[in-house]
Image (cartoon, helix red, strand yellow):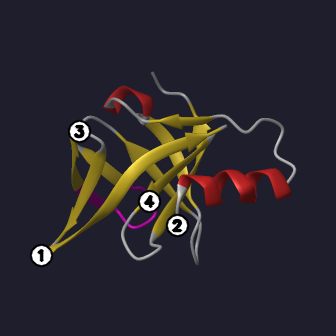
Amino acid sequence: MSVDTLKSSAKTSNWYKVDTIKVASKKQILGTWIEINKENLTVQIDEHFFNYIEHHEKLKYKFHKDTISIFHFNNKFGGKPYIITDTLFLLGDDNYCLKFIRKNHDN
């Protein structure tokens, strides 16, 4: 999935404003988010972990240059982070995309 695809999807979804912000620092992603997936999960992102509240699970992550890597046991996933309005997208290889909607600003 590309950034252009995200913008196009946002426009067809009638989002109020389609500003794509490439995430440049951890500070931009800190706070509470809802991961949009099979089950919507609350995720508290702090300086070191993606804390999945409902599953009582903390996943260590690393923000390096323009990529976020999330570690789960021996697996690593993630991608290039972008924010459109209040939605965080992690765009990975092979059209892989994680989507998080901001619940609140904790910082």
Q: Is mark 3 on a helix, strand or loop?
A: loop
What residue is disc 2 on? 1
Residue 12, given in percent of the width and then of the height, sits at 84, 58
In contact (CB < 8 Å): disc 4 and disc 2: yes
1 and 3 marks in contact (CB < 8 Å): no
Q: Quadrant of residue 38?
A: bottom right
Q: Do the residues labelled 4 and 1 touch (CB within 8 Å)?
A: no
Residue of label 1: 74
What's the residue type where badge 4 is placed? Leu
Q: Residue at 73% x, 56% y: name it.
A: 8
**Circle 4 SS class:** strand
Name the foreground residue: 56 vs 9: 9
Crowd band around label 4 with a 10 angstrom C-alpha radius: few (<14), some (14–19), many (20+): many
CB atoms at circles 2 and 3 under 8 Å apart?
no
Quadrant in the picture for residue 66 = top left
* Residue positioned most to the right: 14
Percent from the top left, x then y, of residue 69?
24, 56
Per the image, the residue denoted by label 4 is 91
Q: Residues within 10 Å of mark 3 (few under 14, many from 20)?
A: few
Element type where label 1 sits in the image: loop
Can you tell which mark lies on residue 48? none
Residue 65, numbered circle: 3
Tag 2: amino acid:
Met
Neighbour tally class for label 2: few under 14, some 14-19, many 20 plus, Cα within 10 Å: few
Image coords of residue 36 (percent x, y): 59, 64
* Residue range of the region highlighted in magenta in the rendering: 52-59
